[in-house]
Image: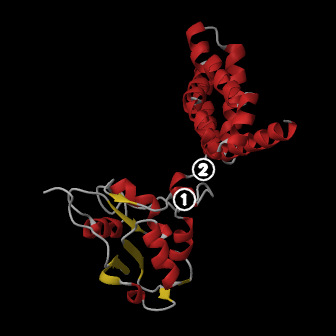
Amino acid sequence: MLEIIKDGLRATLTSYRDFQGTGLIVALFLFLLVYLAFSQRNRYVKDALVKYPVYVLLVFFCPVWYVYVYYFEDYEILYRILWLLPLGVVICYTLTEVVMGLNEKFRIPAFMVAIIVLVICGKYTYSSEYITLAENEYHVPDTVVKICDEISVDGREIRAAFPDEFLIYVRQYTSKICLPYGREMFMNFGSWGNELQKTVNADVIDSEACAFWLRDTETPYLIVSSSKKFTENISAYDFVYVTSIDGYDIYLDNNAYIGSDFD
């Protein structure tokens, strides 16, 4: 039982570490939370901005979670409990209270200092590799839109294997295109489809294995970069070339039924 608790605690702390990022903004939040606990006299504000966050943290770090995360594979989503923390509200409210509580001649300098502190504690959002200028109204790459439109079938869902660089976009654009593997591949969570994912994203695709895993996961469509090499022509396994879109080739299982189920 002790080992279970240790493993669960380790997983919980890892989840908390992943949530806090650099840790500076969370450290600022906790510092201001303590300040607000001693300085705030309004009972309603104190309930919402002090007691409520404390309760969320107590729930997250409750020892019961240690056992839960040991037995369930989805422990990595536990950090979502921490989304309930009103970080922005507590930080902005408290800093505003501090600035407005100063003598009027000190307010502007104090406000500038508060802004600098927030900039230092935060991280520039648009530096992420997953954020780019929008190419269309859907805010997903145009290539994804074109491929999905090409393989969509009216009246039913269709499954397609995409390279990793497109996984986070397909379901954002349409729910009609299903994936044999998705975000769980990046998180080492789940096993269905992972052999296919490894095969599709290998430097050289094993044609026989790729055809086998595509059919094993009931996936008629394969999308790969046009520069991708195969061990042999995948047409030998009855996958036919359909078309190329923006440097990506589309292949279809010649034995798959992709007609509409509805007339």
Left or right, 206 with reference to 154: right
Q: Position of residue 133 (x, y in %)?
A: 39, 61
Residue of label 1: 127
Query: Image check: 247 left or right of 99?
Result: left
Please determine whether, in this image, residue 104 is positioned above or below residue 125: above
* Residues tagged 1 and 2 counted as in contact (Cβ below 8 A): yes
- Residue lying at 72% horizontally and 29% vertically, measured from the top left: 64
Question: Does 163 sit above or below residue 92?
Answer: below
Q: Is residue 142 something that shows in the picture?
A: yes
Q: In this image, 9 relative to 181: left or right?
A: right
The percent coordinates of residue 222 (x first, y second) are: 40, 74
Q: Residue 246, labelled with which disc?
A: none
Q: Nearer the viewer, residue 121 or 214?
A: 214
Q: Does the image show residue 16?
A: no
The image's mark for residue 123 is 2
Mark 2: secondary structure? loop
Q: Position of residue 150 (x, y in %)?
A: 26, 70
Q: How many marks?
A: 2
Classify the position of the N terminus by image quarter: top right
Q: Callout 2: 10 Å neighbours few (<14), some, many (20+)?
A: some
Q: Is residue 109 above or below residue 218?
A: above
Amino acid carrying mark 1 in the image? Ser
C-alpha separation, residue under disc 1 versus residue under disc 2: 8 Å
Judge left or right: residue 131 versus residue 69. Answer: left
Q: Position of residue 90 (x, y in %)?
A: 59, 26
**Local secondary structure at mark 1:** helix
Residue at left offset 32%, top offset 84% = 241
The amino acid at mark 2 is: Lys
